[in-house]
Amino acid sequence: MSKDLREQFANAAEAGRAAFVPYVTGGFPDHGTCGELIMALDGLGSEVIEVGIPFSDPLADGPTIQQASQAALEAGATPSNVLEAVGAIAGKVDAALVAMTYVNPVLALGYVGFAQRAAEAGISGVIIPDLTPEEADDWLEACDKYGLAPVFMAAPGTPPARLERILEAGKGFLYYVSMDGVTGSDLELGTERLAAMQRVRATSSLPVAVGFGVATPAQAAALAPVADGVVVGSALVRRVQEAEGPAEAVGSLSELAAQLRGALVR
């Protein structure tokens, strides 16, 4: 059964923390190991876990996640079998599960078909970076039908009027992109950037999760006071890529994830 995303962020805040939102690439390095990674992240107390559904042209992702997605595709990952693998373990996971993918893989199943399968797999929300709110009426209708939260992105350059439109269309949380760039880029957190995030959070009707480029406990600690949640993707995927086997991948990813989550105390 899917979890209430807003409740997950509220629970973290009540505990004096920003929510931890780690990312894994679905089907990478294989479905079984990916399931173990999700279980390990859940065991560490993650509030929300993003599962990327691999796509051959992931425009928002940098080289690390691009390579992981390509490897998963070459190993046979599809939207259907990634959702099926997630569904097999969702009942054992306390974290809310969110799918992140692109509009083409969603269209391969159709908006309604994808939403139905995601909901049946225990997914709580779906992030589609290349689907704008203005073009999402059919998707929003499908999400509403199956109780999914459509999660949209905003960035430092998003004008106030457009941010308002994004917040009106979105549910669950707002994914705030920390920089102009792709996932895994170098992130510099100056005073001005942190103040901008704080301003967005102050006006947002949804919890704000900040992602892109977060790789170290120091960065997570800097973001914790200005964000409701912190998303970490490429740094964790890199640990899996560098491991010599599944056991080392789970151990290495868990080591970094524990450090990052521990840094989110306010």
Image (tube, rainbow, N blue to C red):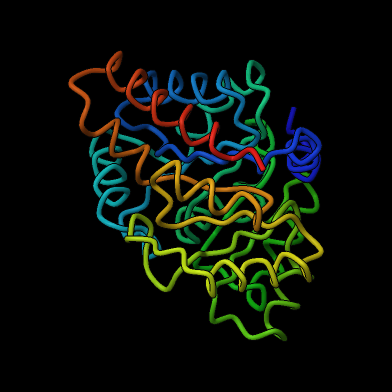
Residue closest to the eye, 9 or 15:
15
Q: Please determine whether, in this image, residue 184 is positioned above or below residue 125.
A: below
The quadrant holding residue 179 is bottom left
**Residue at the (67%, 34%) spot, across then down:** 96
> Which residue occupies the extreme left position in the image?
244
Residue 117, can we see it? Answer: no
Residue closest to the eye, 242 or 31:
242
Lateral position of residue 221 relative to residue 173, left or right: left
Residue 1, can we see it? Answer: yes
Lateral position of residue 65 relative to residue 154, left or right: left
**Residue at the (68%, 23%) spot, across then down:** 94
Q: Please determine whether, in this image, residue 152 is positioned above or below residue 255.
A: below
Residue closest to the eye, 43 or 17:
17
**Residue at the (24%, 34%) spot, across then down:** 241
The quadrant holding residue 111 is bottom right
Q: Which quadrant does the C terminus fall into? A: top right
**Residue at the (33%, 60%) spot, across then down:** 185
Q: Position of residue 46 (x, y in %)?
A: 60, 31
Q: Position of residue 91 (x, y in %)?
A: 67, 18
Q: Which quadrant does the N terminus fall into? A: top right
Q: Position of residue 250 (x, y in %)?
A: 36, 20
Lateral position of residue 56 relative to residue 45, left or right: left
The tally of labels here is: 0
Q: Position of residue 129 (x, y in %)?
A: 51, 63
